[in-house]
Amino acid sequence: MTVLTPKPPTASLSAARRSTLATVRAYVALTKPRIIELLLITTLPVMFLAAHGLPPLWTAVATLVFGTLSAGSANALNCYIDRDIDATMRRTRRRPLAMHEVTPRNALIFGVVLGVLSTLGLGLTVNWVAAGLSLAAILFYVFVYSMLLKRRTSQNVVWGGIAGCMPVLIGWAGITGRIDWAPVVLFGVVFFWTPPHTWTLAMRYREDYAAAKVPMLPVVAGERRVVLESVAYTWATVLCSLLLWPVAGTTPFYAVVAAALGAMCLWEVYRLLGRLNAGKTGVALRPMRFFHWSNAYLALLFLAVAVDSLL
């Protein structure tokens, strides 16, 4: 007769902890933390600009915390909507829904709960203008971008990117309770920055988007058109960034930094065009160089906004 040896209690507890941690990690992954980091990078500096210096600590913390929940809500709901796409694409097939680590129903509930908490939290602790803008960003990202634009038009990230611009307005409204021209200018910076940033990533993963039948511009257009449009949008980004100097009355420090960063960003996008003119194509174009530099550009530009506000 076989005698079954019971597992030690410590082993069972250890397995339970691992299971709990894995579940927590899966739900955190649904919120796409790396995207949230980029959104927060644009939120806090605008609060410095609105406050003409250090913003009130509680307001800043509350805006960032509930802003994080808001972005997490939009991203979790996007994962729910795009679960079929994510399972097809190599870049996204390890996301929680694609890996069946979270059920679609639970992901939907999670996203809705985060959205409710973020909206009420901002309204009760900051102000209802910021809360309304936050809710508008969630609804726009889910219904306009994810459900309407993403699978239907190559202009998906152009207009869908509006949702990613909203943290600029939310940060400003969190301090002032209103919208002014300065945050509108920075809204424009993020708006023009988004297409070339996203398109160069899509150039690298073109086959993924094609397999998922997502009509990103690099899927439906030739590389020359994508690169030339990226050049145009980069120029618009840089010129819009310089407009903040007269509109917001920043010091020459911001103007110099914005000009230098803009020159480097233009240099990189023209290098991409140069490789194309030299006959490079596909991976040899190295579009991810511009993608990574554009991340650094946006972070450093908004850091300059914060530093300038303290001068």
Image (spheres, rainbow, N blue to C red):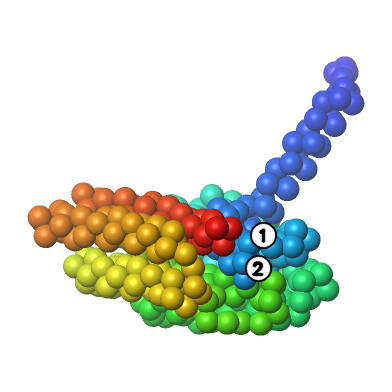
Residue 121 horizontal side relative to residue 31, left or right: right
The number of numbered badges drawn on the structure is: 2
Q: At which x and y percent is residue 76?
A: 64, 64
Regarding residue 261, the answer to whether it shows in the image is yes
* Quarter of the image with the N terminus in it: top right
Q: Up-down: is 223 above or below 25? A: below
Q: Up-down: is 263 above or below 132? A: above
Q: Nearest the camera: 158 or 111?
A: 158
Q: At which x and y percent is residue 106?
A: 73, 62
Q: Nearest the camera: 311 or 10?
A: 311
* Quarter of the image with the C terminus in it: bottom right
For badge 1, the amino acid type reads Leu
The residue that label 2 is drawn on is 51
Q: Residue at x 38, y 70 (%)?
A: 242
Q: Residues within 10 Å of mark 2 (few under 14, many from 20)?
A: some
Task: Say what secondary structure mark 2 lies in.
Answer: helix
Q: At which x and y percent is residue 60?
A: 71, 62
Are the residues at dot 2 and dot 1 in contact (C-beta closer than 8 Å)?
yes
For badge 2, the amino acid type reads Ala
Location of residue 31 (image quadrant) = bottom right
Q: Residue at x 69, y 54 (%)?
A: 27
Task: Say what secondary structure mark 1 lies in.
Answer: loop
Tell me the tag on residue 96: none
Q: Residue furthest left?
A: 278
Q: Residue at x 44, y 71 (%)?
A: 245
Q: Residue at x 37, y 59 (%)?
A: 256
Q: At which x and y percent is residue 258?
A: 39, 61
Regarding residue 145, the answer to whether it shows in the image is no
The residue that label 1 is drawn on is 54
Marks 2/1: CA distance?
A: 6 Å
Q: Nearest the camera: 65 or 303?
A: 303
